[in-house]
Structures are given as structure tokens and as C-alpha cells.
Image: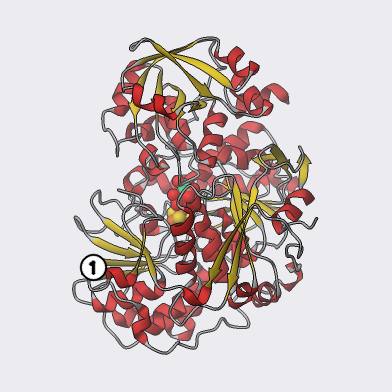
Amino acid sequence: MGLTLTEKILSAHLVEGEMIKGSEIGIRIDQTLTQDATGTMAYLEFEAMGVPRVKTERSVAYIDHNTLQSGFENADDHRFIGSVCKKHGIYFSRPGNGICHQVHLERFGIPGKTLIGSDSHTPTGGGIGMIAIGAGGMDVAVAMGGGTYYITCPKVVKVNLTGKLQPWVAAKDVILEVLKRLSVKGGVGKVIEYCGEGVKTLSVPERATITNMGAELGATTSIFPSDETTRGFLKAQGREQDYTPLCADADAVYDEIVEIDLSSLEPLAACPHSPDNVKSIKELEGQKIDQVCIGSCTNSSLLDMLKVAHILKGKTVHPDVSLSIAPGSKQVLNILANNGALAAMIDAGARILESACGPCIGMGQSPNSKGISLRTFNRNFEGRSGTKDGQIYLVSPETAAVSALTGVFTDPRSLGAAADITLPDTFTINDNMIVPPVAAEDMGSVEVLRGPNIKPFPVSEPLAETIDAKCSLKVGDNITTDHIMPAGAKILPLRSNIPKVSEYCFAVCDEKFHDRALEMGKSIIIGGSNYGQGSSREHAALAPLYLGVKAVIVKSFARIHMANLINAGIVPMTFADEADYDRIDQLDELKIENVGKQISEGNIVKVTNVTKNFDFDVKVDLSERQKEMLYAGGLLNYTKQNS
Ligand code: MIC
Ligand code: SF4
């Protein structure tokens, strides 16, 4: 029986377990990446492990999220990360060099390698045939130290692409179509593998847009084969030596097959407030808009920017619209500056932003009240833009640019014949903003620079014999990490200070949560399905840990958040019977006796609702290793105990 590409790469990196779907496997990690909003914590954790030099083939730290510096905090954090990198063997991509996923694809990604990153959009690397997975900072720290990374051996979904995109229909419309069909939880426990004749019609940046936004399916990752197009991209980046051809065997067996005829797709938009709430632009056409933002790790490649410049050239942004553009990397911006495309954008009235995440994570450009904003980004969760009642639509760069000119939702196919835009044979290569680490023998000379913003992370305790605690919060389905631990310009600078950042924990859902949880001392959270979707931020586990949350009982979890809870020593539980969700109210007292013993004896644990006087069962479906981690009180304690 033939193998899928996913199975080939995973089995070549397998160090623990067997390739049995649904069971836990441990894999060797070749590369890691971090960004600054999760990086400070990841490097504090790396330091706590006491490993002098990273053991990966390549580890890179990017500064791209916290780039608004309205106080000392972000600048201090950047200096801290830069100095840790220099000392411990990590390459440091300076602020201004671009968004982690875009730069990693350009300069470091290698087909067939494994990459984990402390950012949920790490699967962008799947665009050049990597197994690239988003993870919590602590998992990345362990991988940098040479430790194994554990995942559930995934099911593999084949997305069979046929045909060819019509003019002005984009890669973004492909992934929006997949989201429409599979939903934001349709990818949980799965890798999405793109195959078929249609693959060769898509360039590497287009493939990367699709794998990037596979994160919104909840998938472990997404991957494209590595083919002649990949070779061409790597060659243009001066890295042809990194090319290896890779694809699935012809007789590979998949768990699911999704057929997509590229020629039949039309421009789409994900409507507020979920990436799977997809409608066609035709359905929205004519509605007035207030803002357009072009950029983010999903759609800020040179190809995207050239198309946008082509559409804007010689025109003026509609008087009622604010248009911002953030090219994804210094390389992209440089080429645009040299070939005149940037001038076309400026002439049209675009507000050019630095090459960073920017508005995507609420770092500026929040829309007006109730403002309708078209963004080429990947997430439109409520409040994420910084404007609580902002109405965010996720669209392709083509739709965004043409709508910025007309002031209303506009189908880019109205532009007529396709523009002849291709990628150059060689990109401008200048890695002068990537600082290499010092040689191992010189590491003693590097001082790690710690500003006052950096506070130690909260210490978790070994699992108590009995958890007797009130329910501090009850929430519904699809709670995102942006609900649990919001980001944005005001809160992101506090990421290295857990006591301070936790003041905003769940503020989007209930402003009183922080005070209530602190007052309770210890508590339990109740939630619906797909709890913790979205970001990889471990702060969404560390803040609840600091506030005394001992267990989270939900209908189902998103992958990265569940791993982060276990790493923090918080017990993740799912209802054995989902109907029990309705029988529990906020403030109910719940009692779980002999938790550790119950978990060790099986997967079902009995919980008593003391307030309402009934018992119900929850599942704690974990591997032996994960159980040991919970007994120890999280990954750091577990690693210390076992080293
Ligand atoms: C996001 O897009 O939500 C982020 C900000 O990039 C996060 C990481 C973070 O919260 O720092 C992610 O996707 O993991
Ligand atoms: Fe940055 Fe947005 Fe991409 Fe997250 S999704 S890495 S915030 S650009």
C-alpha cells in the first residue's frame, strides 16, 4: 500500500510510537520558529531548561507582532529575544525584516523537513512541502533543546485539485471554499494534503496562502507536494540546493477525499465573525465598505502585492475608504520599491505599513464603530480588530484592491482580462536583517538583556488529590484564544508579564471574570465545542493557570490549546454526554475526587455537581505521557523530574 506525503515525512522523523491514526507519536523536529508575542515566554522556558545551545538544524526568532512601540515593553522584549538568540544559537530576524511565515518560506523552509513554530500559521511552510505545525511556546522550547514533539498521528485528507483558476479568482478563494465545506473544526486531527493536476497551476505563494489558512480548519497542518514549481521558487531565492522532489505514492490511501475543480470557483468572502461563514462576493456586491487592509502572513507575498499594485495603478482609493497595505517582508517591499509597484500604491492613496502583522493582530488600523472592513487576513473573530463591533470580511487581495477603489464590495472579475503577472526568476536577496548567533565558544561573552517587563511565568503545582472548585465561567461553542486571552496594541506588550496580562483574560466574554476567578482562588471553566480554536498563544493557558483554573470541561477542544493546557498542568476534560453541559451553571460547585487515580485507571472520570446534587462523567482522553505531565503539574515540572 502506498503512502501519502504526510505519512512519508512523518515516518522519516518518527522517534516514538507507531504510525497508527489517533495514537500519540513523537517526531524529531528539524527547524523551529518563534515570533515576539509568543517568543519571550518560549525563550524564558528554553532558558529554564538549561540547554546551552539549540540542537535543531535551524531555529529562527522573528520580530513581527509587537511592532507598535508606545512604551518600553515591546522594545525591551525585542532586545531580550535578540540577546537570547545570539547566545544560544538562534538566528534573529530583526524588526522590519517581515512576518515570520513569509520570511521563513523565502529564506529558510526546506521541503521534507519538519518545522514547529510558536504561531498557529506555521503551516505556511506546507506550501513548499514541509510538515510545518503550530505549537505552544513550551513545545517549541523543548524542540529547540532537542526534545521530541508529540502529536496525535493524523488522518490524511486528500484535496484533489483539478482545472485552473479563472482570471481574478485567487488562492484565497480556494481555501475559503475548503473552509465553507469543512468548517472551522473540520480539520481537527487531520492533515490536509493537496494533490491532483490542479497543483501545478498554483505558484508557491499561492500554495502557501492555502496551507497558511488551513489553520482555520483546526487541522494539524496542510501540505503541497514539492515539484518543479517549488524548485523554481527556491532557485529564485538562491536556494536550489534545498530542493527535493516529494509527492504521495500513486496508490496512497486517504481517509477522506475532497474534490475541487479550480475552474468552477468564484471570488468569496468569510463574513463576520468566523472564517467559515463564507458567501460569494456576488451575494455581497454593492454593499458599502469603510476600510480595506491588505497584508498578513496569508496574503502579503510579492505575487499578491504585484496584483494589488496593478489594480491600483493610476486610480485613487474611494474617498470613503481607508486602504492600508503591509508587504510581508523586507524582500517583498524592496522589490516593490525598485520596480515602481510601491509608487503605484502610494499614488493611489494607500497607507503603507511596515512589513509586520500590524492590523491582523489589532496593532493599529482598528476600523470605525460598526465599520465594514475587507481584509486579506485569515481571522475575523469578534473584537480581534480592536473595534468590538467592527465587521470584518476576509477576502482575496484582488477583491480587496478593487473594492478599495469602488467603495463597495466588488467582484474583481469586473476587471476583465487577466493581468500578466509572474514571479521574477530571481528575488532580491539580502539577509542583512537576519543576525546569526555567536559561535558556541563565544556564548559566555553575550549578556542576556532583561527589561522590567519580563516577569517569571506562573508555577504550576502537581495535580491535587481532589479538585473541589466553583465554575468561574460558562461559555458557548467556538470560543477562540482571542476570547480567552485577547491581543491588540494595548494588551500584547504585557505578554511577558502574566499577572498583568491576565487582567484581560476572557474580558471579551465577561469583564468580571478576572476578579471572580482570583477571588475564588481555584475554579473550573465550562465550555462548548471547539474550545480554544485559533492562535497558539500559551498565554490562553498561562493566564487561567495564574488565576487558579484547575480544569476546563468542554464538549471538544482545539488541538494546540488542549496541548497548552496540559503543558500548564490544567486538566482538559470533555463531557461524556454533551447534554450535561446544559445542567451546569456558572458558580455551581463541582467536585472531582481522586482525580489522579481516576485518570490513571481509565479515561472516564466522575464529577459531582455539589450545588445541583448530581454526578456526571467526563472523558480525559490522554496518552500516558500527557497523564504523567498532569500529575507533575505541567511540562516544565515533568521535564525537570525526568531529566
Ligand atoms: C494570531 O494570528 O492569532 C497570532 C497572534 O499570530 C497567534 C500567536 C499569538 O497569539 O501570539 C497565533 O496565530 O498563534
Ligand atoms: Fe501575524 Fe496575523 Fe499571521 Fe498571526 S495571522 S502571524 S498576527 S499576520
The answer to whether residue 64 is seen in the rendering is no
Residue 200 position (above or below residue 531): below
Q: Between 260 and 42, which is closer to the camera in this rendering? A: 260
What is the quadrant of residue 91 in the picture? bottom right
**Residue 190: horizontal and vertical position, in percent?**
60, 49
- The quadrant of the rendering that contains the C terminus is top right
Q: Secondary structure at mark 1?
A: loop
Judging depth in this view, the residue of 158 and 345 nearest the camera is 158
Rendered-image quadrant of the N terminus: bottom right
Q: From the viewer's perspective, tell me whether residue 90 is left or right of residue 553.
A: right
x and y, in percent, of residue 289 in the image: 23, 68
- Which residue: 67% across, 59% down? 130
User: Is residue 491 left or right of 459 when viewed as pictured?
Assistant: left
- Of residue 490 and residue 370, the one placed in the foreground of this image is 370
Identified at 66% across, 29% down, the residue is 623
Q: Amino acid at mark 1?
A: Ile
Q: Nearest the camera: 596 or 361?
A: 596
Instruction: Find residue 496 and report its horizontal and vertical position in percent.
Output: 45, 38
Label 1: few (<14), some (14–19) or many (≥20) C-alpha neighbours in 10 Å: many
Q: Which residue is label 1 attached to?
A: 289
